[in-house]
Amino acid sequence: MRPWYETKPRLLDEIKAQLKQEYPTLHVVVEDGSVHIRGSLPVLDAGRKHELDRFAIDIGLPADFPRTPPTVRETGGRIPQTADRHIYTDGTACLYARPEAGRFWSPTTTLVAFISGPVLRFFENQACFELTKQWLYGERPHGTPGILESYMEEIGTTDPEVVLRCLLHLTPSRIRGDLLCYCGSGKTLARCHQAKVTRLRVRIAPQEARRSYYEIKKWLDGQATAAE
Amino acid sequence: MTPNEFLYAVLKAQSLDSESDEVKAMQTEKDKVKALLHECFAECPIKIRYAGSWAKTTMIKESYDLDLTCYFNRDDDDAGGTLEDIYNRVREALQKQYAVDPKRSALRLSGKEGKAKGIYYHVDVIPGRFVDDEKDDAYLFQAEGEKKRLKTNVQKHIDHVKDSGLTDVIRLLKLWKHRTGLTELKTFILELLTIEVLQRSDAAKLDEALVKFWKKMKDEGADFVIKDPANPEGSDLSGIFNESVRSMLVSSASDALARAASGDWEGIFGPVSEPSKDERVAAFATLSSKSPDAPKPWCDVR
């Protein structure tokens, strides 16, 4: 199979042009059949005048780019490769909880928007943590509790059972408005939170909803058993 | 402040003296590495020497590491018959106490367990074998690229840089390389380019020397010829100084020239005086309020 940058050369040219304009210290490197964006990423203050920090990074664009989101690595050896700093042992940064991927990446997201969004926020967070031992934007708990937390925020609830019921609406490929709403109002979804579920559907595919549902269910069951 | 005064202030801010915390930590780790290697290769008379920016006096605070060569005798097969064997044996020895990230010829060390897990120690070990009994030239294994063997001479490289009289310009260009994100451009290549362009130059001031370098790279970087002083006819540098690297260099040199022409030296090298901790904390607090929907980092570990 020919790599994407050969089948879509204009996309690669667009990325190069956008980077030169917005992030001139990041460079496109084609290496061993894959594309990397390498260089240094400045962390600027809110007025974008003063540099607060700078990180050496590598953004890898996968073979099926732009379908799958890029991977991000810090390459300067500054951030320890540990889960507590949200870096896997292979050096990959974990920018957000898995089910949130749809919030920050879609095949129409430009690379510059991705860098200016979750990538920059991640390194602002890391720079602040190095300075103060506090996460600027917070952090998620590892594993399933972090996934559950992300859904709670997204749905606007503190009740894990509400999250599970909401995920059940998202597991089929078609949203059914005749089912009872996840919120517990007793109304049908169509007369209650269908708009919200429809918005969530754009970002959370049925497969991810199923996977999340079973992970959270298993974790909650484990918690209940441990409490007994 | 004139551009020349500004650049000297940058150099001062980038200095790492032997009493600095960074250097002390590096030296402590270096002693541990030496002890570990001597213990693991007690039967082999290995020679461990400083190489890289520490030996060349071109270290900068923004991006530094201590390179240690670990060379075996020409006829010593205890560590392995081939260069790759030596590379792997040294890696295995270091893995007893460190997490080892193998690079092209070097082995990068970071913490393995406990508090230091994943923390980079700023120490790299370069295994190799002396070419002959003179113990000057050595062969290194190359884990990447087509050629698996590289002939080199650390002392020649060190002398080439130190005797050039250009260590200040080299330090500034290393800082520029780092800030410009020219990670693909090897420091070794940058040093050779700097010396080749400026060794017979009449540029008296640092800013003049830098402008001359960037202009040369902008105009001729695409096909500028350099030779490895340790192996002028043998080392093929085209693999590490390829078309892609040259293109990035030309583009970045053009940007730097434009900034220098408009007097924006701070845009190239950053400010000399860094904001205080309180100022940075305040700046981060402002950032936080501007991005209420920022993602929170996570990790898929159970």
Image (cartoon, coloured by chain):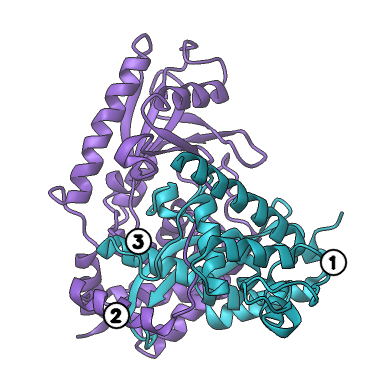
B215 up-or-down from B100: above or below:
below
Question: Which residue is farthest right?
Answer: A1
Tell me residue B283's x, y (percent): 29, 80
Residue for badge 1: A7
* Colour purple, chain: B
Q: Are marks 3 and 2 on the same chain?
A: yes
Q: Chain of mark 3?
A: B
Residue B201 visible to the viewer: no
Question: Which residue is farthest left?
Answer: B19
Residue for badge 3: B170
Identify residue type, mark 1.
Thr
B122 up-or-down from A16: above or below:
above
Q: Chain of mark 2?
A: B
Residue B283 circle label: 2
Q: Quadrant of residue B135?
A: top left
At horizontal 79% and vertical 71% (from top left) the residue drawn is A9
Tell me residue B98's x, y (percent): 38, 32
Identify residue type, mark 3.
Ile
Disc 3 vs disc 1: which is toward the camera?
Answer: 1
Tag 3's secondary structure? helix
For disc 3, the neighbor class at 10 Å (few under 14, some 14 to 19, many from 20) is: many
Question: Which residue is farthest front?
Answer: A186
Q: Please state which of residues A74 and B286 is positioned toward the viewer in this rendering.
A: B286
Identify residue type, mark 2.
Ala
A89 left or right of B121? right
> Does label 3 or label 2 sit earlier along the sequence?
3
- Write down the colour of chain A: cyan
Tell me residue B273's x, y (percent): 21, 76
For the residues labelled 2 and 1, the Cα–Cα distance comes to 43 Å
